[in-house]
Image (cartoon, grey):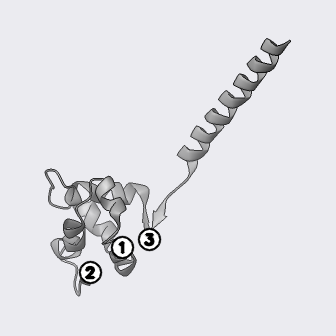
Amino acid sequence: MASKKVGMMVMMMMIVVVMAIFAERSVAIDLCGMTQSELNECKPAVSKENPTNPSTLCCDYLKHADISCLCGYKNSPLLGSFGIDPALAAGLPTKCDMPNAPTC
């Protein structure tokens, strides 16, 4: 009888874990007017290791973003944990030739 209860508990835990995984994948991120895929497009240009020039798509996305909002993350310790160089990120508007690019 106890083994059936343990088996049911394990089954319930597995269901909860699977539901959490599906829920996590369905959540859309919107940060400062940029979606997760738009942010990902710009990541190679702000990467600590081997940064590239920003792509045309990245620059197009950045033109519609809230730059002041993005500047608010400049000193965030989270950037380093995602492999993002804050100095490269702050310089991205200039590299994208944005007119009147704000400075962070």
C-alpha distance separating marks 3 and 1 = 9 Å
Query: Helix or strand or loop: what does disc 2 sit on?
Result: loop
In the image, farthest residue toward the right: 1
Residue sitting at x 23%, y 73%: 90
Give the quarter of the figure containing the N terminus.
Answer: top right
Quick one: label 2 or label 3, which is nearer the N terminus? 3
C-alpha distance separating marks 2 and 3 = 17 Å
Compared to residue 100, the image places residue 67 above or below, namely above
In the image, farthest residue toward the bottom: 100
Q: Which mark is residue 4?
A: none
Residue type of the residue flagged with mark 3: Gly
Quick one: label 2 or label 1, which is nearer the N terminus? 1
In this view, the residue in front, 87 or 42, is: 87
Query: Helix or strand or loop: what does disc 1 sit on?
Result: helix
Q: Residues within 10 Å of mark 1 (few under 14, many from 20)?
A: some
Q: Nearer the viewer, mark 2 or mark 3?
A: 2
Residue sitting at x 81%, y 19%: 5
Please tell me in which quadrant of the rendered image residue 94 appears.
bottom left
Q: Residues within 10 Å of mark 3 (few under 14, many from 20)?
A: some
Give the quarter of the figure containing the C terminus.
Answer: bottom left
Please tell me in which quadrant of the rendered image residue 98 appears.
bottom left
Query: Looking at the picture, how far across and down is residue 37, in whole percent?
Result: 39, 54
Marks 2 and 1 in Cβ contact (< 8 Å): yes
Query: Looking at the picture, how far across and down is residue 13, in whole percent?
Result: 69, 30
Quick one: label 3 or label 1, which is nearer the N terminus? 3
The residue wearing badge 3 is: 33
The residue wearing badge 1 is: 70
Q: Nearer the viewer, mark 3 or mark 1?
A: 1
The residue wearing badge 2 is: 104
Residue type of the residue flagged with mark 1: Leu
